[in-house]
Amino acid sequence: MANKNYINIYNNLVKYSRNKSIFSLFTDNDTFSDRLLIFFFHFGFFLKEYKKTQDKELLQEVFDYVIRELEISIREIGYGDASINKKMKTYINSLYSILEKIDNWDNQDVSKKSDIFQSFFNYDGDTVKLVKYFDKYSIFLKKNSFNSFLNGVINLEI
């Protein structure tokens, strides 16, 4: 499968991550770091859901494509070559940590799910609305096929 189709997956994830109402659930700020973490949560849930039905090589290609696109975006922000590799390593470690923590998402109670978000965001407030958002996002992924993400931008109505 050609990488050109993966741009739709990436664009969907970016679109969902730009939902300004998400940020009001856990912060007064809209920082690059928070936006990237929200992107990683969307991507993490995407990978978690579709690893059940898709070939590992295909998901690895999607993973590699998304990481390359992120690196390009970070370069466009103006980070230099010396700091890009260090930043990317930190970001990828965050993604792996998110993947590990959400792996058992469906079997956790609201409190444990909320703790996951509080461990990533510097926020002492209530993250239950964020938990509810990602519960709904998880259901949304279950209802939409992997191919629908390849074929175009899907409206997430949560």
Image (cartoon, helix red, strand yellow):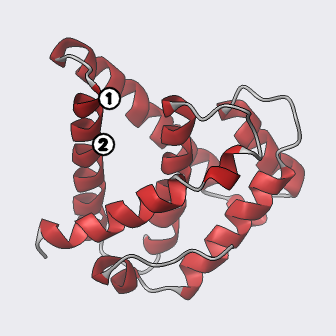
Proximity of marks 1 and 2: CB atoms separated by less than 8 Å: yes
Residue 12 in the image: above or below residue 126: below
Out of 50 and 39, give the one closest to the viewer: 39
Amino acid at the residue labelled 1: Met
Amino acid at the residue labelled 2: Leu
Residue 90 in the image: above or below residue 66: above
As drawn, is 101 to the left or to the right of 112?
left
Residue 146: quarter of image? bottom left
- Horizontal and vertical percent for residue 27? 73, 35
The tally of labels here is 2
Does label 1 or label 2 sit earlier along the sequence? 2
* Mark 1 neighbour class, 10 Å CA radius: few under 14, some 14 to 19, many 20 or more: some
Location of mark 2 (residue): 70
Residue sitting farthest toward the top: 82
The residue sitting at 51% across, 77% down in the picture is 155
Q: Which mark is residue 80?
A: none
Looking at the rendered image, the disc whose residue lies closer to the viewer, 1 or 2, is 2
CA separation in Å, label 1 and label 2: 9 Å
As drawn, is 136 to the left or to the right of 59?
right
The residue sitting at 81% across, 46% down in the picture is 114
- Horizontal and vertical percent for residue 110? 86, 56
* Mark 2 neighbour class, 10 Å CA radius: few under 14, some 14 to 19, many 20 or more: some
Location of mark 1 (residue): 88
- Horizontal and vertical percent for residue 123? 78, 29
